[in-house]
Amino acid sequence: MIKNELQYRITKTQVKKFITQLNQLKTKEDDLDPILFQAEKDAIESQLEEMQKELEEYEQLQRSKSPPLLELRSIEELPRALIKARIALGLTQKDLAGLIGVKEQQIQRWEAIEYSTTNLTRIKEIIKILNIVTLKNVHLPRESVSLSDFFKKMKDVGLDQKFIVKRLLPPLLASRFEDQDKRIAPDLLVLQASALIGKIFHWTPEEILSDTPLQLNTALIPEIRFKLPKRRNELQVNAYTVYSHYIALLVAQATEHLAPKSLPTDPYEIYHTIQSQYGALKIENVVRYIWELGVPIIALSDPGAFHAVCFQIQNRNIIILKQKTLSEARWMFDLLHEFWHATQKRGHIVHLTPESGYISGNSEDITASQFAAAALLGKNPQILAEKCMQESYNDARRMKRAIYSIARKEGVRTDVLANYIAFRLYLEGDNSIWGIAESLQEKSRIDSRIIIKNIFLEYADLGALSAPDLELLRKALIYEGE
């Protein structure tokens, strides 16, 4: 955005240079590779269009013949509304500085960072001078709000500071939060963050900034059945689930063009279809098979909460996986476990499988796990398990060799069979096989999260999302080490 006459003159000069550069490029079209020519032309035209829009906006504001009443519909609009109102009133940065009793350089600094560190008293003073009108749904708090109070209130509902900065705030705002001196009350930063977070969790900025404790609106995700192991922070699980539900809504919006299809309920049909149409049984092929049925899949990577979830939104299924393991078998197992839930059409279901190996013993989860194992093995998993028990003489010390032997004889994946044996014995009260199962896992050379994200990007129409929502989704799909 152009904020003063100097920037205006510089931008006009740059526009002339870009027009000249574009004309020169067009004269060389026949001598350049068509792809390189188009890429360079698109880049110049894109920058030129952006600068021309900025010039037009600045000139329109300057042509205003009466003091404007800029309507402020949301907190996010406030910084630029202050700058636009000043320009439209014909005030220079020096003029505004004189009206509020600060130096011109101070106004320049505030506008350069869009008032992100300006205290609330100054903001209200500038609003009054510039005659900005706020609508009924936008209210500024009466007093300044400290960062510590803001983050404490967020923590009380299960949102810690690291997660907020890493996942919920756009890069520029996040960097400003990280750079802040905690002794300063950056009111506008808190207001902007409150507006963004409130959209996800259905709070108004006024509720976030008031003295009243916040409440998570878990009614947004009805019929959630939590299976929490000991020491799991229920507040954090609830908060992360509401966040995941919002991400699922964005995924649903970006994939509206996909027609949902009838979902198969026979695990052996799934196994043979993947083998015949996609080839080897691996995470990429299982993911593509399920996408082709109209079921979007994404992967997240934040610690805690759950390992997998199937949201049913407006009669559509969205599967979210969340693991850090390199075991391809476990990614496929969780995916097909949630796929079974997708076939049930029973509302919004969250399936929690913590890192500890905890597995719910309810009948639905047992059925879903047996379904997943059958779809990955292509044979009855219980019969294969019995063969392993017989060959090992029910001796855990012989189980590893027995799993190897039966997997080879039956032509099934060793890691998948090992996981099912561990699951089966766990349900019988024996937790001793998880270590053996872990040692038998095939480690994927490519992070399964990356595979899942790349396939999502192939199918999704990201142009269907607003800029803030697109940025939120982009941050959700950033993984450590990527």
Image: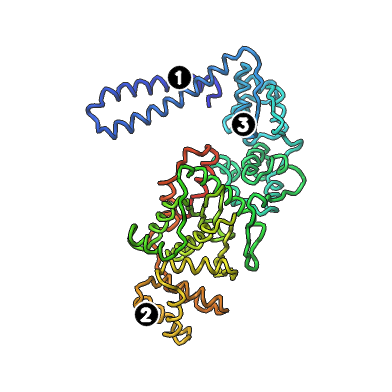
Mark 1 and mark 2 residues within 8 Å of each other at the beta carbon = no
The percent coordinates of residue 189 (x first, y second) are 64, 39
Closer to the eye: label 1 or 2: 2
Please tell me which residue is depicted at 52% across the width and 55% down the height of the picture: 320
Which label was assigned to residue 406? Answer: none
Circle 1 residues within 10 Å: few <14, some 14–19, many ≥20: some
**Alpha-carbon span between mark 1 and mark 2:** 75 Å
**Alpha-carbon span between mark 3 and mark 1:** 26 Å
Viewed as shown, does residue 256 lie left or right of 128?
left
The percent coordinates of residue 299 (x first, y second) are 49, 54
The residue wearing badge 3 is 77
Viewed as shown, does residue 275 lie left or right of 299?
left
Residue type marked 2: Ser
Q: Residue furthest bottom?
A: 393
Please tell me which residue is depicted at 28% across the width and 35% down the height of the picture: 35
The residue wearing badge 1 is 12
Mark 3 and mark 2 residues within 8 Å of each other at the beta carbon = no
Q: Secondary structure at mark 2?
A: helix
Circle 3 residues within 10 Å: few <14, some 14–19, many ≥20: few
Is residue 400 shown above or below 19? below
**Alpha-carbon span between mark 3 and mark 2:** 66 Å
Residue type marked 3: Glu
Residue type marked 1: Lys
Viewed as shown, does residue 31 lie left or right of 420?
left
* The quarter of the displayed image where residue 275 is located: bottom left
Mark 3 and mark 1 residues within 8 Å of each other at the beta carbon = no
